[in-house]
Amino acid sequence: MPTTLEAMVAAAKAVVPSLTANDVQTKLQAGESVIILDVREQAEYEQGHIAQATLLPRGLLEFRIGAVVPDTSTTLILH
């Protein structure tokens, strides 16, 4: 198990796919069923966000994810 911050980030990057803005736009245009979660804080979200994004700040993610994403098979895109 990773024990340093750098090791944890590297381990996460190894298993969590990364998408470009173009990749996300392609998925949306193709009608793929995805939910975009903006995990920044309210003030950051208000400064600008992806139109289809739902605000769910990182500090509340564990508490509210079930209400925002009831179907656990839904593809999530976090920003």
Image (tube, helix red, strand yellow):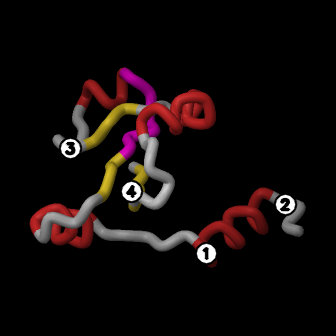
Q: Nearer the viewer, mark 4 or mark 2?
A: 4
The residues tagged by marks 2 and 3 sit, at their Cα atoms, a distance apart of 35 Å
Label 3 close to label 1 by CB (< 8 Å): no
Mark 2 vs 3, N-terminal side: 2
Mark 4 vs 3, N-terminal side: 3
The residues tagged by marks 4 and 3 sit, at their Cα atoms, a distance apart of 11 Å
Which of the pair 72/5 is nearer the observer?
72
The amino acid pointed to by label 3 is Gln
Mark 4 vs 2, N-terminal side: 2
Give the number of marks.
4
Residue 33 bears which disc, if any?
none
Q: Residue 46 appears in which quarter of the rendering?
A: top left
The amino acid pointed to by label 2 is Thr
Q: Which residue is mark 1?
A: 15
SS class, disc 3: loop
Q: Residues within 10 Å of mark 2 (few under 14, many from 20)?
A: few
Mark 4 vs 1, N-terminal side: 1
Direction from residue 7 to residue 71 in the image, left or right? left
Label 2 close to label 3 by CB (< 8 Å): no
In the rendering, at what x and y percent does residue 74 appear?
40, 57
Q: Quadrant of the N terminus?
A: bottom right
SS class, disc 2: loop
Q: Nearer the viewer, mark 2 or mark 3?
A: 3
Q: Which residue is mark 4?
A: 77
SS class, disc 1: helix
Magenta span has 40?
yes
Does 67 appear above or below 71?
above
Mark 3 vs 1, N-terminal side: 1
Q: Which residue is mark 2?
A: 4
The amino acid pointed to by label 4 is Ile
Q: Nearer the viewer, mark 2 or mark 1?
A: 1
Q: Which residue is mark 3?
A: 52
